[in-house]
Amino acid sequence: MVIATTFSRNTLFVRTFTSVLWIIQYREFTLTDLCGLRSQSLKKMLCPALLLAFLAFASCDVSHILQEQHLPYETTTSEQPPPRPYVFSYTAGRYPGHTDRQHTEVSDGSGVVRGSFSYVDPRQKVRTVDYVADKQGFHPLLSDVPPEHPTDSESVARAKDRHFQLYAKIAEQHAHPEEVPSPRETEAVAAARAKHAQLFKVIAEQHARIAAEREALLREEEEEKQHLQELEQ
């Protein structure tokens, strides 16, 4: 029953939409050939057709589109590739015919790597590092464990304590420094300052006078140029 109703509504929509297209085509044809047709008559022809198309579109049943589609699916598992073990080793040196390092590594292909690396240190001593790398991380094993850091002797410890005490005392004394007043000027400095100010004033007056004279000369030259131009005209 639902399928039949949906089919009938869809058919009605198709017919109505086809009719609207035909009317629009006919309208374009008449607009091209019949120039005397007014816009008001076109509106009267087109509005009912558009209204019917809108009603037909709104009455269509689209519930089947919104329904969830349960598609069959299946899970597949791919086989793991076979393990690919490897082995490599090499020796190297700083110049041809010389060997000062050696490296060997073996892997079973499952993620576990074992290796050994040897080299000659600057003291001409062979040092070896055996390591294992697995899911838990990297685990090195050194042939020569480095020595622990030396501890301070009693004299060194006392010297450190004395140094820290002096440092704390000096820092406390200079935490709030006192304001040191600036030195007062002597009579000689005051006289030199007054002489300098007097000379500066004299030189400034001379420069002002020279600037005024230059400005007056420029003004006279400009007036002479204007006078000559008036005579030439």
Image (cartoon, grey):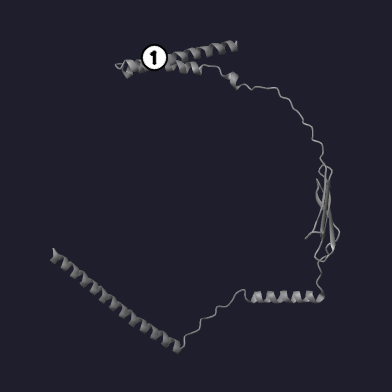
Q: Is 147 above or below relative to 36?
A: below
* SS under mark 1: helix
Q: Is residue 129 left or right of residue 36?
A: right
Can the viewer see residue 25? yes
Residue at (50% x, 12% y) in the render: 12
Work out which quarter of the rendered image holds the N terminus and state it.
Answer: top right
Q: Is residue 233 left or right of residue 162?
A: left
Q: Position of residue 29 (x, y in %)?
A: 37, 15
Residue at (59% x, 76% y) in the render: 177
Residue positioned most to the right: 143
Q: Position of residue 32 (x, y in %)?
A: 34, 17
Crowding around mark 1 (Cα neighbors within 10 Å: few <14, some 14 to 19, many 20+) is: few
Can the viewer see residue 131? no
The amino acid sitting under disc 1 is Tyr
Residue at (39% x, 84% y) in the render: 196
Residue in front for this viewpoint, 136 or 28: 28
Q: Position of residue 92 (x, y in %)?
A: 80, 56
Residue in front for this viewpoint, 218 or 99: 99
Residue in front for this viewpoint, 134 or 226: 226
Q: Is residue 8 left or right of residue 104?
A: left
Quadrant of res 68? top right
Q: Is 65 above or below relative to 193?
A: above
Residue at (41% x, 84% y) in the render: 193
Work out which quarter of the rendered image holds the C terminus and state it.
Answer: bottom left
Q: Is 171 above or below relative to 114?
A: below
Residue positioned most to the bottom: 187
The residue to which callout 1 is attached is 26
Q: Position of residue 214 (x, y in %)?
A: 26, 75
Q: Is 99 above or below relative to 185?
A: above
Quadrant of res 167? bottom right
